[in-house]
C-alpha cells in the first residue's frame, strides 16, 4: 500500500490537506487528474485542481 498526502488547491477555495491510501504508486499529475472535474453539459469549463506538498510513500508495516 502507498500513502499519498498532498495539499489540494482549488480556485477560489482554501488549501485542504488530503490523505489517500492506494495499491499503486501515484504521481502528482495523476492525483490532479483524479481530483479535477471535467466539463459538464451546460457549464463553461471544468474545475481544475492543483496539488502541492505531494508525497507518495510506501506504507508497509
Image (cartoon, helix red, strand yellow):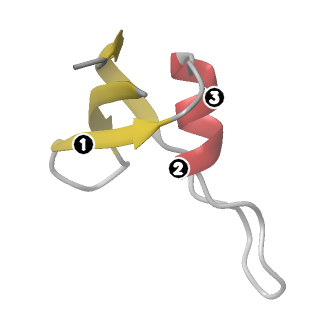
x, y percentage for residue 48?
Answer: 56, 46
Query: In the structure shown, which secondary structural element does the residue marked by tag 1 occupy?
Result: strand
The relative height of residue 18 versus residue 27 in the rendered view (above or below) is: below
Query: Mark 3 and mark 1 in contact (Cβ < 8 Å)?
Result: no
Lower sequence index among marks 2 and 3: 3
x, y percentage for residue 31?
Answer: 53, 33
Which circle marks residue 18 in the picture? Answer: 1
Lower sequence index among marks 1 and 3: 1
Q: In the displayed structure, does residue 42 sit left or right of residue 37?
A: right
Q: Which residue is labeled 2 in the image? A: 35
Rounded to the nearest angstrom, the CA distance separating label 1 from label 2 is 11 Å
Name which residue lies at 32% across and 27% down.
3
Query: Mark 2 and mark 1 in contact (Cβ < 8 Å)?
Result: yes
Name which residue lies at 28% across and 28% down.
6
Tell me where residue 19 sits by quadrant: top left
Mark 1 surroundings: few (<14), some (14-19) or many (≥20) residues within 10 A: few
Q: In the displayed structure, does residue 29 sit left or right of residue 52?
A: right
x, y percentage for residue 36?
Answer: 58, 51
Q: Quadrant of the N terminus?
A: top left
Query: In the structure shown, which secondary structural element does the residue marked by tag 3 occupy?
Result: helix
Query: Mark 3 and mark 2 in contact (Cβ < 8 Å)?
Result: no
Amino acid at each position: 500500500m502507498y500513502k499519498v498526502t498532498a495539499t489540494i488547491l482549488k480556485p477560489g477555495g482554501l488549501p485542504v490537506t488530503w490523505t489517500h491510501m492506494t495499491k499503486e504508486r501515484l504521481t502528482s499529475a495523476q492525483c490532479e487528474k483524479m481530483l479535477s472535474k471535467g466539463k459538464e453539459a451546460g457549464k463553461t469549463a471544468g474545475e481544475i485542481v492543483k496539488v502541492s506538498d505531494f508525497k507518495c510513500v510506501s506504507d508497509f508495516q
